[in-house]
Image (cartoon, coloured by chain):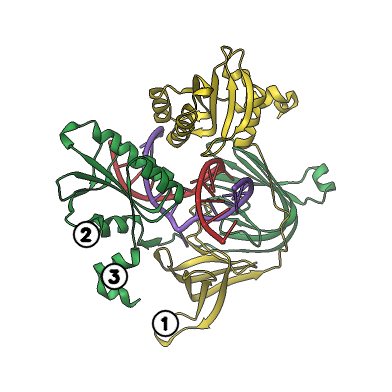
Chain colours: A yellow, B green, C purple, D red
Amino acid sequence: MRAVIARCSVDYSGRLNAHLAPAVRLILVKADGSVLVHADGGSYKPLNWMSPPCKLTEGPASSAESADGVTCVWTVRHNKSEDTLTIRIHELIAEMSHDLGVDPGLVKDGVEAHLQELLADQIELLGPGHRLVRREYPTAIGPVDIVARDPSGGMVVVEVKRRGEIDGVEQLTRYLDILRRDPMLGQLTGVFAAQEIKPQAKVLAESRGIRTLNLDYAAMRGAEDPTARLF
Amino acid sequence: MRAVIARCSVDYSGRLNAHLAPAVRLILVKADGSVLVHADGGSYKPLNWMSPPCKLTEGPASSAESADGVTCVWTVRHNKSEDTLTIRIHELIAEMSHDLGVDPGLVKDGVEAHLQELLADQIELLGPGHRLVRREYPTAIGPVDIVARDPSGGMVVVEVKRRGEIDGVEQLTRYLDILRRDPMLGQLTGVFAAQEIKPQAKVLAESRGIRTLNLDYAAMRGAEDPTARLF
DNA sequence: CATTGCATGTCGTCG
DNA sequence: CGACGACGTGCAATG
């Protein structure tokens, strides 16, 4: 990992063309050759970058570039496409470098899979007397998150999302369309379950006879593991 | 902008919980207080981060933390949510800092808007005798990318994407549904046009009677501006 | 301010 | 390796 603060201009050519006028920026060069150009704002996304696998070559400035105050030119080329990032260094201000080694990696906990798991375990959140049929119920167009039966024996088809938006309703609708082609399955009810359901998604779901269900992640986790309440 | 190379462990708590075991990493602290933790690989996405607006406070290690070799603790708290990033510094290896000032910003050129523009100008790519009605044709649920008329006077509704996936077909379907409620518009044809159309999107589109059209960006740009062929 | 649709999205998983 | 869906998606344009 090499971190450089430099006055530079940057050009990217690939899926689009992009240009950065000369200014002071932080340039990161990772061990795999990938490069990030960061400004002192924005969020985690760099102004410009090149993803691995790629190769950085440093070269001298042309006479025209030298006349513009460019001292050297870094060219980063992607190995498998025509994508090119050109960094023209006007002034090198500070630099540091260190071998970081391989990172042990991120441990995550608490995403959509967990919501699905919790709802499967607490299936009566769908309504009293509901019983789980199975999670990841397979269909021709992909697995349905949860299938259950209501007290009258009707099949309940559940799509679980962290954030419920229109896309999720469309996805559930496709599952319902497919499953309704099989008359053996009888009456089907769709349930769109999410921590947060956007108004438009709610309206669309209801207009299609799909129930919406707000999931309270903290409460569900608490019900599952009482010690979790302590956090 | 402050860049620090340090052996550290990191914990994030917010929409999910995530943990990074102790290792040497690069920590960036931007002028707005936002923080990025980068490893020597991955792409531009940090292992962990905190987006602005947020506030970084440095504190001493607790006695328990000191026993684990922690020398100090950085806590980054988001201003508007409960999101917290905790960085435990085990060893500070290198550091540099510089005021970058405000960046002049990125100039982009050549995205989906351009594809739409090119197709509008070369509307006969839809088929011989087609004529442009208008771009960004307004509907109650948002603007249709392009509306045209086929030789028989029928209305052609076009959704343009760079990469054609299921979402885009759903979007076009919603436009067609809305527009078909107006009998004044007569017969409607849907066209899903993209540089690259995914198989599932193609199947879904065709099952709904929507034509798919592959766009050759390079050729379209060449037809528009013959000098572009030289690049 | 909330919603929508795009992104050089990136990243995992599964066929 | 490609397709597909999730993401702490981020981000800008828009009503």
Disc 2 marks which residue? Answer: B121
Numbered disc 2: what chain? B
Q: Which mark is residue A65?
A: 1
Is B208 on the left-hand or right-hand side of A219?
Answer: left
Of tags 1 and 3, which is closer to the observer? Answer: 3
Disc 3 marks which residue? Answer: B222
Q: Amino acid at mark 2?
A: Asp
Q: Earlier in the sequence, mark 3 or mark 2?
A: 2
Q: Secondary structure at mark 2?
A: helix
Report how many numbered discs are placed on residues in the image: 3
* Mark 1 vs mark 3, CA separation in Å: 29 Å
Q: Residue at x 51, y 75 (%)?
A: A75
Q: x, y percentage for residue A222? A: 68, 24
Q: Which mark is residue B146?
A: none
Q: Nearer the viewer, residue A138 or B100?
A: A138
Is C12 on the left-hand or right-hand side of A174?
Answer: right
